[in-house]
Image: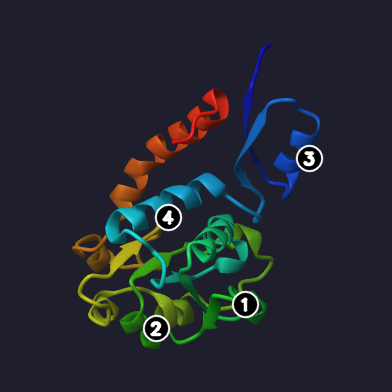
Amino acid sequence: MGVSVLVVRHPEAGFPQRLALGFDGHVINAGDGVHAHPTQALLDIYTLIEEFGDLKGRAIAIVGDVLHSRVAHSAIRGLSRLGTTVVLVGPEGFLPSTYAGEGVRVERDFDAVLPNVDAVILLRIQRERFVAMPISDEEYVAGYRLDRRRLGLLRKEAIVMHPGPYNRGMELDDSVLDFAGWRYARQVHHGVAIRMAVLDLLVNARSL
């Protein structure tokens, strides 16, 4: 058929890599299980670069269900390579302490983190991946929802992001949607261009 690129989204972690072993062309991982989502991480990182330029020395908080977020897993790797301090925030059931490592911190107190970061990336709770929820909605909202009060704790130049889809009332309330630093629309806008660039690089083998 002359196919040179396969774009693969699959519930099994590692499936794109296994597919690549039997395919002579390029395989783009568009999300595999809870493992990785590289192109979403690229557009999120590009949004941060557009905002701040060099990310070395910046502190980026990723908040919520990190355990099941393939976007977060890819973003952690990408941001760490760029010299960013990654601060992971959430309850133990969504964020095991084992995620801490070189350049990556695990924090439980969201309020204490907010004044010290340049950006906050919110994540949705992936209820479909839990057998039983480890925390109630009320507990999560009290500890980790970004609302008007918590927005007031951020630095003036800080921004808020979300890979989507977002759930009003859980990880954020409507005040975030009116916040001057809300960058969701910019992230979505960058999605087409970033994926076009990946395809162009693979198909035409040009440095971009």
Label 3, label 4: how far apart the Cα atoms are:
27 Å
Q: Where residue 28 appears, x then y in whole percent?
A: 61, 37
Label 1, label 2: how far apart the Cα atoms are:
17 Å
Q: What residue is pinned by disc 1?
A: 101
Label 3, label 1: how far apart the Cα atoms are:
28 Å
Q: Where residue 201 appears, x then y in whole percent?
A: 52, 31
Q: Is mark 3 on a helix, strand or loop?
A: helix
Name the amino acid, label 3: Arg
Q: Where residue 61 appears, x then y in whole percent?
A: 43, 72
Circle 1 residues within 10 Å: few <14, some 14–19, many ≥20: few
Which one is earlier in the sequence, the residue at label 3 or at label 1?
3
Circle 4 residues within 10 Å: few <14, some 14–19, many ≥20: some
Q: Residue furthest right?
A: 22
Q: Is mark 4 on a helix, strand or loop?
A: helix
Q: For the C terminus, which image quadrant?
A: top left
Q: What residue is pinned by disc 3?
A: 18
Q: Is residue 164 visible?
A: no
